Image (tube, rainbow, N blue to C red):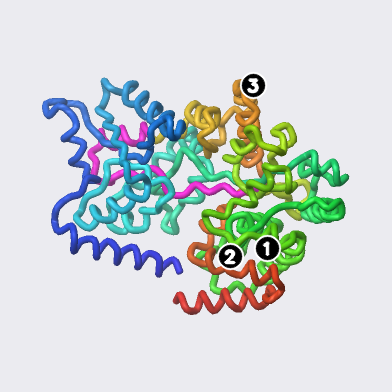
Amino acid sequence: MKRKVLSILLCTVMTAALFTGCGKGDSSSDSAKDSVDKGSELPTITFTHGYYHDESEWAAAGEMRKIYEEFAEMHKGEFNFVIKADESGAEGIYNTALNDLSAGGFYDIADFGGWDITPVASSADAILDLKPYLDDDADFKAGAGVCYDQNLTEDGKVYSVREQIEGVGFWYNEALFKEAGAAVPGDWKTWDDFNAAVDKLVAAEITPFGLNAGWPTNILLAAYNQRSADSREFYEGGRTVESFDQASFKESLTFIQEKALQKIDAANFGPGGDDDEAYRSDFFAGKTAMLFNGVWDAGGTIDCEAGAENIRPAVFPTDESGKTAALLSGGCGYVVSSKLDEKQTEAAIEFIKYMTSPEIASRIIEKGIGMAPGTKVDYDALAEKVETDDAKLLVEACRLCQNADYKALGLGNTFGDAEGEIQSKYAGLKDGSKTADDVVKDLDDFLAAAE
């Protein structure tokens, strides 16, 4: 499957060449030179990002631009750091890169915001391997956090790191757990405790959670696959697995069917898709006891009917008593051209170090922008610094995810195209028309067709 995805991307580049001819697009490093005084002796690089939104529309965008501008000001005597907001966003930045690669161009440095340009760009020898710089600086590597291992290629390169990651555990309503007499997640030791708590919630006629044929069920399935060494080994295989007919994965599907999907009625099982937000709205309305979603949903607690004082963050148990798991997905973020000269390259690396520093990581969390990957964030200091309830919840959620014993990529990041095929089976598992064996057969047929 990995080979197929790469070939599709390469074909996209070749097709783009038919339309772009021999000219360079806006991502060429030459574009930086047009933005400054031609007589300047300072090295110049242009950084392209997707935070173009008005601050009134999205406060995080304004804050990120301030962070970039402060860096440019700090180094104005050393190099010209030209900041360019692309109003087509991360997807547009990705598409421009595809076009420009076909003509031999690439951005000086750009934030791809999760759109993975690295397979195509690295095969064209257009981007810089960051691993030597990471290996040479312990603080830089600590700032990259999980991005280092997650983005390490088979040939030992790291082409991208990010300043934000997708941190996912879950949220629970403490008041509903107490009403049901169920042990709260912080007291769980294994998945058996999860099952016991769900049974008590159901017995008390409290809906334990909302699920659908998509995101929240994907989270639960991915989390359950972190329960043991065997299940983690299979899960880590991701795109390279040759068959889903593995005992640990079948057990995971059976868990989803019997311990999750059968614990909720049809009204709490949505169709999935971007517009299906019932699982969130029900939780914040106080109708369900758990919400499988990321740290960013600390913001959902503001003025919620369930009462912000009742909402708590948690991470998942494992079958190793007391050990926990979280889903942390970095993906493709900052990517640097391999065609820059030495001074330009130094400037680009300095910028990425700045963006992954403990200071900026703390600021990203404090301002409610998201979770940073860095392992040297002082969460105690942050907890004392933030004032609002939602900010305090975000800090604690990030801390729990970062301190989990096992950290894995999300389902889509791990299984690629197979994610859609997996989630298309949830409805059958819910209504009983599919068994775990049926789903495994369907998934293996999908793999065979994808060869």
* Residue 270 screen position, x and y as percent: 63, 59
In which image quadrant can residue 214 be found? bottom right
Residue shown at 25%/28% (left/top)?
A: 80
Range shown magenta = 326-351
SS for dot 3: helix
Q: Would residue 336 be counted in the magenta stretch?
A: yes
Disc 2 crowd, CA 10 A, few/some/many (<14, 14-19, 20+) = some
The disc, 2 or 1, on the residue closer to the chain's N-terminal end is: 1
Residue shown at 27%/51% (left/top)?
A: 96
Q: Would residue 22 be counted in the magenta stretch?
A: no
* Residue at which label 3 appears: 384
63 versus 432 height, above or below: above
SS for dot 1: helix
* Residue 37 screen position, x and y as percent: 15, 27
Residue shown at 17%/35% (left/top)?
A: 33
384 versus 424 height, above or below: above
213 versus 284 height, above or below: below
* Residue 246 screen position, x and y as percent: 65, 72
Q: Which mark is residue 108?
A: none
Residue found at the far left of this picture: 39
* Residue at which label 1 appears: 230
Classify residue 214 as left or right of residue 340.
right
Can residue 140 be seen here?
Answer: yes
Residue type at numbered disc 2: Gln
Which of label 2 and label 1 is nearer to you? 2
Q: Which mark is residue 423?
A: 2
* Residue 245 screen position, x and y as percent: 63, 75
SS for dot 2: helix
Classify residue 274 as left or right of residue 175.
left
Q: Nearer the viewer, residue 207 or 317?
A: 207
